[in-house]
Amino acid sequence: MQAMNRLALTIAGRRVVQPFYVRNLRVSTRTHSESIPDVSLPPAPRDALPPQPTKKNASNVTRKKTKAATKQSKRTGGQKTPPEKISGDSGFTRDTWNGDWGKDELAPPSSKKRRAGSKRRPRKENVPANSQASSSRALPPHRIPYVRRTEGYISDDTEKCTTVLRDVESPSEHKPIAQLAHGLDRVLFNPGIYWLRDPRSRIYNFTPWLESIPSVTDFAFERVTGFVKSSMDNDLWKVAKQHKRPFAGSTSSLTGLLSHCYFLISGDKDVDTSLLSRGFSHQPTNFTPGQRMPTSVVLNHKEGVWLIDSDKTEELAEKNVLTWMGTMLEKFLTVSEGEFKKLLRSSPVSEEDADTRREAYRYAMSDRFVMRSQLDCVDSRLPGTGVFDIKTRAALPIRLDILNYEENSGYLIKSLTGPLESFEREYYDLIRSAFLKYSFQARIGNMDGVLVAYHNTARIFGFQYVSLEEMEERLYGSGNGTRIFNKCVSLLERVLSDAVSIYGERSVRCTFETRELSQELNVWIQPVEWDDEAEGKPCPITELDVRVTNFLDGKEVKGSKAVADGRGWVAQWTLTEAALDQTDIQRRLEAARERQFTALSFPAGITTLEEMEKVWAKIDFGGKHSAQEMMAAMTQLASRPATSEGQSEDVDDAVGATPASSFPSAFLTFREPDKSIRQLRQLAQQGREKTLQEEAEGREKVVWGSVEEGDCAVLGDGTLPTGTDDRSASAELDGIVVSVGDGCVTRSRES
């Protein structure tokens, strides 16, 4: 505490600072008198007390007369009115009334003087909250007003904790569930990676025929049953109608919606990558942008049932080689070599082999849903139903640089661990970008897990069986996957029920998005069909905002903790309809759709958008254009030199003239390959050179294990050829020399 204290007084509109040590001071003016309350101050030292003001120096604390006061004195003949003393012995005198504010002695220096004398930036002026500038600012996201509000809670039974889905019998006959071929069932019972060919010894664990993947353009996709959308599945609609369920959909259309429900419930919980090597200890543990991308669906109304389809541009799926590669590789791994060759375009069509029955599906229902899941494969030795899914996982450069997949097919997986060219890198990406979707698909299909085949579109490197428990451990930690799935389904049921009630019994389009760290699920709903003239207004858009609060044993906790805990869990949800005008809702929806855009890098040899348009029109893996025509177009463009303007010469001759409308209207953009893409292309080029060197060596292909059943037919009902000894035998099978001896089979393809 300083010895001297100062008090700022306002007297007749001016601020006066004067040291004082009084208990009560009354200041009197002509217009009013103001009482300054008692201020408790510590006693000041005697030597620090200022001298008491006297008549001589009392004028030092009075106001100076202004020009107006001087003129007044002249009008009165120069006679001055003596100032009146304030009662008391304080020495203060009362000033005469002055209508001018005068100069503020305590005002800060002007901006010019401040800039000249100091480098400090002037303090930003405070704007009152009720000012016009403040009122024009938009409300923050968490303060968006609403026109209605709905609340509820989702609890669970921690003792039983059974799935909300119950099996429903399929109304139609279907094909039997496929089984793995080529001895791949060994992968199901061995944890970790199973190399197709050991990189050190070059010994094959399976037939070398699996190593080389046929070209996707050589496969006759019309000879296999294709994907059936929910709105086109009459059996799915019948089941929903029969059991009075208002919603029905397949795993492809539901997993995206369930994922955004999980993001909201879990509070953006990170995944667990602690089992990976130290090289990944500082890598991101959140979900990838592709996994968090907004999901759009169409709810097609049909006699009281909304059939849910993905609202993806079909052209994008048709142009994606991985979409077709997955269908082909499912057959590649589940049928024999001879049966697979019948599905190639080079083989004649056989009517005897045609099977018109549906693919095997599981239908299951919850309180308001009927869900459909395709059953890829089965092995009765696995726990539960024995059903599992087949997933074909393309290597890193293929996924990030999809249009350049042919050049990137040289990329190799060389080791188990490492930041690149390793199974560990692919597994790390699976955790962040695919395990959530895989786990929901396994839950809907009542599957035990997934078999992952790692490839580069030209070659398979190995296999891995990932159980449902392993996927959920990476996602949820020690949490119970069953009740997490149940809560996501229950929340989705409530959101969709509210969404379809807005526009009545009509088809609607919905977009779901839970932005990272937003703690809010935004849903935009608009009618699919709308006539502005008949309805008398433009097509409306409604926004729903959903929030969730989690409680463990009655105590509010973060979503990440609730997901990983085993105690009694209650999720309280709140759904509000935003009261924003249509312009703001449209703007927010367009911003979400922009985050759905896919940015593709130009393939090698393509440098301009005009060239890319023409190549894009020729990309067709389903057979509309011939494979030779499509591949010739891309090869010609990639091999032609660029002109001085940066465009390839004779582009029209290579691929034919194509209008600019060949591109889809949304969800797609093109860009030059960045530094990381160029590095991956360089690794792919190095890998291709290494592969060519190994092939030039002409080394014998050796297979570990026993002769497969399909191969034994050549040798004669599982016995060795006549005239051979029990310890060694050899025969020729489709250009491969098969040698049996001491428990192993060796195969060497003749050059």
Image (tube, rainbow, N blue to C red):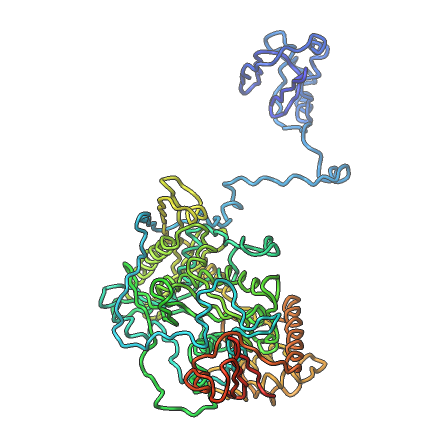
Please state, as top left, top right, bottom left or bottom right, where the C terminus lies in the image. bottom right
Q: Quadrant of residue 736 in the image?
A: bottom right
Compared to residue 436, the image places residue 562 above or below, namely above
In x, y percent, where is residue 628?
Answer: 54, 89
In x, y percent, where is residue 363?
Answer: 30, 67
Compared to residue 600, the image places residue 479 above or below, namely above
Compared to residue 615, the image places residue 536 above or below, namely above
Query: Left or right of 606: which side holds 363?
Result: left
x 48%, y 71%: residue: 392
Query: Left or right of 493: which side holds 211?
Result: right
In x, y percent, where is residue 472?
Answer: 44, 56
Of 104 and 484, the residue lying toward us: 484
Count of picture labels:
0
Of 119 and 495, the residue lying toward us: 495
x 38%, y 53%: residue: 484
Query: Is residue 265 shown to the viewer in this render?
Result: yes
Single out the residue that lies furthest toward the right.
116
Single out the residue that lies furthest toward the bottom.
348
In x, y percent, where is residue 301?
Answer: 30, 69
Q: Quadrant of residue 401 in the image?
A: bottom right
Of 608 and 83, the residue lying toward us: 608
